[in-house]
Every structure is written in C-alpha cells, then in structure tokens.
Amino acid sequence: MTVMTKTAPPPVDAADLEQDMLAMGRRARAAARQLALASPEARTRAISGMAKALRARAADVLKANAADQDAAREKGMDSAMLDRLGLDEARLEGVARALDSIAAIPDPVGAETARWTPENGLDIARVRTPIGVLAIIYESRPNVTADAAALAVRAGNAVILRGGSECLRSNLAIHGALIEGLTAAGLPADAVQMVTTRDRAAVGHILSGLDGSIDLLIPRGGRSLVERVKSDARVAVLGHLEGVNHVYVHESADPDTARAVAVNAKMRRVSVCGAAETLVIDRSVAADLLPKIAADLADKGCELRGDAAAQALVPAASAATDEDWATEYLKAIIAVKVVDGIDEAIAHIDAYGSGHTECIVASDDKAVERFLAQVDAGIVLANASTQFADGGEFGFGGEIGISTDRLHARGPVGAEQLTSFKYVIRGKGQIRP
C-alpha cells in the first residue's frame, strides 16, 4: 500500500467534493453496521493489527511528519504548535503502545450496565451499544488519528477523520497503517475513513451531517474551531473546549508538594490541554512560597504574569491583564493570582476556568473536599498534577479528547464514552391494562 508523504490530492471541484463527502458518509454508515456486529475478538485483532502496522511503517510516518514540520516552520508556526505536530521514534512508539492499551481494555459493546424487574414482571436490562458513525475534526496532533480510530473501533463505531491541513502527510501515513490493521482482521476499511483534501469546504459538508450519515461530531482544537462546530453543526456535538486550568495552592499545602505539582502541571509539556495556565495561591503563604515556585518555574524557562500582589513578591513577573486569566497559553507562560482564601480561589476559577481540569494542593482534608465538591470541571484533582488529565492515565487506553460538556460524556472520552445504550426487555406475555 502506497503511503503519501509529500503532497495531498489536488483540490476537487465543489460539486465533486460534495458527492465525494456524501459517498464517504454512506460508506461509513454501511461499515458501522458491520463493525457493530463484529465480535469483540475481531475488534481486538483489528486494533492490535493497527499497532503492529504502525510500528512496521514507522519510517514512512516519520518521513511524512518531517515534511509536515518543515512546511510548518516555513509558514512560521510557533514552537508550541510545532511541539504538538511533531513526532519522533519515542512519540510514535508511544502512539503504538496506546493502541496496544486500547486493544487490551474490555470491549464495551453489549455490556450490561443495569438489570431489574419492576412490578409488571418485565426483565429490563440496559445494554451498551455503538453510537454509529462519528466524525472527528481536529488540529495539529497526528497522534489523534490513531487514538480516535482505535477508540472508535473498540466501541463499534465507524469514524470519519478530518485532521488539520498542517499534518495531512502525517495523518495519511498513519491512516494507511490503520487500514492495514483493520482489513487484516477482516473488518471493512470504510470503518475508518480520512478526508484527504485540504479544502475547507469539506468541513462544511461534515457539519451538515452528510445527509444524516453522521451521528456524533467531535471537535478537538482551539476555541475558534469548537465554537464554529457548535454554531454550524446540524448533528449532535461533543465539545472539547480549551484547557484554562488552575493549580490552587491552599494555605495548608505542603511546600514541597506545591512546588513539585505546580512545576509539573505547567512545564512537563506546555502544549497539551491539561497544562496548567494559572497558579492561584493563598496570600497567607504567598510571601514565603510564591518566590520559590516562581524560581522553580523560571529555571524551567517559564514566564510569569501576575497580579499586583504577585508582582510585589516576584518582581520579574510582568503585569497580568484580564485577558491573561482566560488564556490557554500552550506555551511556557503562567498567570499568577494571589487570593484571600478558598472562597476567592473558587470564585476566580468559576469566572475564568473552561471546565476542563482544576487542582488544589492542600493538607487540610476539609479544604480538599470542599474544592472537589464545589469546583465545576470535568476533572478535579487534589495534590496531583493537572497533566494527569489524560485518558491513558485514567486507564482508558487513550482518549479522543477531554469533554467539557455536561451531557453524555464529561472528562476523558474513551471507548466507553463513545457508546450509547438501549433497553432490552424480556417478557412472558405481559400486556398492559
């Protein structure tokens, strides 16, 4: 199978593109039926085959990714986005290991989540079922191609993938490996399809639902992408908004834990959506602890932007603006807010957080439990880095993203979250009076 590493297919006529996209939807719908009826063992073989083929094609994938990175540099892409785009041998092996993990998790399709018998004598069960056809629109990160495909297959769904134009070569190379694994397991290649054109009109067709073929649309990218999808989509959307995440250092925090968590949450990898973007710290401990945390961050190359109280304690910090409190930097920059206790900390998070991931560092159990109960986010942590906001770290094998919605799925979206359910009722001739 030929892997495209240099150029994407040329743009197509608008009418031709519409017909191509509609045909893609029809093929996905047909493939979804086959995939849903396949055995869990067949889906497992397919995902394991994807991992095997990805390792076998590693050289082709890395060559394609190098070409994408070169093109991105020529266009002036910033370092954080280049980091999200980039693959090397270690990262690609990490992608393959994620597929291995997804293959190893229990197959959710057909799992019975509840069963009961009411007074009418009916035997009622709630059973997990595939959603059907997913469409995923994402930016920059080629690992999403593999994660999304494997999780969709694990949950018995067909999927249409539309990655960013800046990583099209990488995505096509990865997609070739995924199809090899699928077909070797006897599953239809149309279960995982990729939009191969850079023409943005293709996104509009996906948002239309492809004549009813798409059941759920998942955007993964910046605010502008998510807002456009939510505004224009004619199908259900599972939102993944930006990660404006906070680390709150309570007055009871162990100083060493606070320093370690704050630095890891921000600097382990600044370009991921789980990175901390704002440090909130109690005034009662800020004089002693904030300069130490600031020095730790500065040693890692992080720029600080603080309120007046933070600047007084860390003169190297520049002045934070209202915009800083609501910004997902995805860079080595962090905003710092000094507060008068947990009430003000929670109020600040409520005002500026995106509902993604929030953390408290504290030794006071009452403060911890109050924070965990009152802060409204998909993930809330105590005394642990926000960088654990990852489906793999949750034991899901991988994730399509972190949902900031409140309905259907919230937090890391793994295979289980890509299923719906139906009620299966067994009777003994009952009729309703």
Image (tube, rainbow, N blue to C red):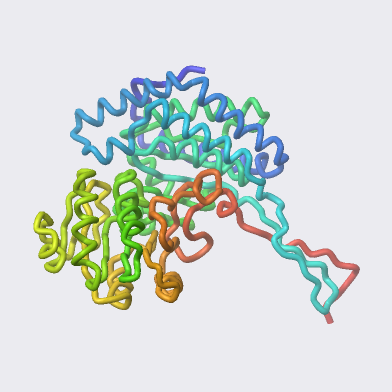
- Residue farthest bottom in this picture: 433
Residue 171, given in percent of the width and then of the height, sits at: 42, 31
In this view, the residue in front, 361 or 131, is: 361
Rendering quarter of residue 228: bottom left
Residue 248, given in percent of the width and then of the height, sits at: 32, 65
Residue 275, given in percent of the width and then of the height, sits at: 33, 51
Tell me if 150 is positioned left or right of 108 in this view. Answer: left
Say above or below: 77 vs 64: below
In this view, the residue in front, 257 or 185, is: 257
Q: Residue at x 32, y 75 (%)?
A: 342
Count of numbered circles on the image: 0
Rendering quarter of residue 233: bottom left
Say above or below: 377 vs 103: below
Q: Residue at x 23, y 37 (%)?
A: 79
Q: Residue at x 31, y 61 (%)?
A: 255
Q: Residue at x 39, y 54 (%)?
A: 385
- Residue farthest right in this picture: 428
Question: In the rendered view of the protein, which quadrant contains the C terminus?
Answer: bottom right
Q: Is residue 208 visible?
A: no
Tell me if 68 is positioned left or right of 423 in this view. Answer: left
